[in-house]
Amino acid sequence: MNHEEQIILYAANQLDEQARADFEKHLADCADCQADLLLWRSVADEINASDSLMPAPVHLADSALEAIRQPNKLTRALRSTGQLLRMQMLIIHNELWIGSAALMFIFLAMALLVKRVEVLYFFAPMIAAGTVTLIYGSENDPAAELTFATPISPWKVLLARLTLVSAYNVFLAGCATLVLLLIIPPRALGEFILGWLAPMTFLSALALMLSLWIGTGNALFIAYLFWSAQYASLISFGEWFAFDPPWLETYRQFWQNPAMLFVFGFALIVFALWSSGRDQVQWRRSIAM
C-alpha cells in the first residue's frame, strides 16, 4: 500500500491502530503527505459544510482506491492497441510473411551477384506493394464478414494490418541494406535507405488504395506499371515518337523526390483508411481484367 492510499484511508478513519500509528510516524516527517492530508480534510469539511445531513457513502474510500488503481486512458489505449495488433497478426496469412522474406532474400542475392544496389531499389517497393494488397477484403480474408460484424471500426483493422505488414517489409529491406553495405562499397546510409523507403511508402499506399476499389490483381498491375514506367528508356521513346517527351523526365524525378513521395503516400493511406468503411469496398467483388 502506497502513501497516497494510506492518506485516503487515514482521512476516512479506516486504518487499524498499528497502520495508523506507523503512518502518523511517517506523516510527521513528510511535508508532501501533510499537504495531501490537508487537501483531503478540506474536501471533507466542504462536503460536511454544504450538507451536514447527507451521510458519506459507505464505500467512499474503496471507490477512491479503485480510481487510483485503474489504468489511465493512455495505458488503456496502448493495451487495446497491443491486443488489436496481436489479433490481426493471427489473421494475416503465414504465407505472406514467408513469401516476403523469400523474395527479399532472392533479390538480395541477385544484387550481391551483380554488385548493384539498384536491384534493391527496384524490387523492395514491389515486394511491399504486393503484400499490402493481400491484407484486406473478402477475396484475401476468409473471415472478412466476421471482421465487418465486429464492433472494431474497419479502418482500425486495416491500419493494424498495414502497420504490421509495413513494419515487416521495412525490417526486411533494412536487413538487406545492412548486408549490401557490408559487402558493396557503401554510400551515404540515409540516401541509401531513402532510395527504397520513400518509393516503398508511395507504391504500397497506391497499391493498397487501388486494391480496395478494383481488386488485388488489377491494383498490382496498375501499381507495377506506374513503377516500371520510370525505367523506360528516354532515348527509345524519343526515337519512337520522333521527339524527347519532357514529361518522362519529370515523371522520373517524381520517383526520386522522397518528400513528395512521403506526402502523397500518407495522403493515399488516409484515403484508403476512409475507403475501408465504405459499403462498396467492404463487399466488392474482384473485377476481371
Image (cartoon, rainbow, N blue to C red):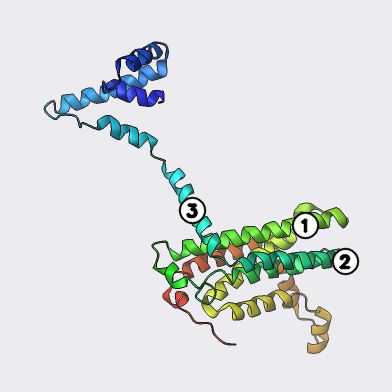
Q: Find the distance from the CA under tag 2 to the CA under tag 3.
A: 42 Å
Q: Seen in the image, is 264 located left or right of residue 51?
A: right
Disc number placed over residue 205 in the picture, else none: none
Residue closest to the eye, 13 or 265 = 13
Q: Amino acid at mark 3?
A: Gln
Q: Find the distance from the CA under tag 2 to the CA under tag 1.
A: 15 Å
**Circle nearer the N terminus (1, 3):** 3
Residue hosting label 2 = 113
Q: Amino acid at mark 2?
A: Leu
Q: Amino acid at mark 1?
A: Thr
**Circle nearer the N terminus (2, 1):** 2
Residue hosting label 3 = 83
Instruction: Measuring from the top left, give residue 189's x and y in whole percent.
Output: 78, 52
Q: Quadrant of residue 103?
A: bottom right
Asked if residue 259 shows in the view, the reply is no
Residue hosting label 1 = 177
Residue closest to the eye, 272 or 66 = 66
Residues under numbered marks 1 and 3 in contact, where contact means CB atoms less than 8 Å apart: no
Query: Pointer 1: residues within 10 angstroms few (<14), some, or many (20+)?
Result: many
Instruction: Measuring from the top left, give residue 181's x and y in whole percent.
Output: 83, 55
Q: Quadrant of residue 2?
A: top left
Quadrant that contains the C terminus: bottom right
Residues under numbered marks 2 and 1 in contact, where contact means CB atoms less than 8 Å apart: no
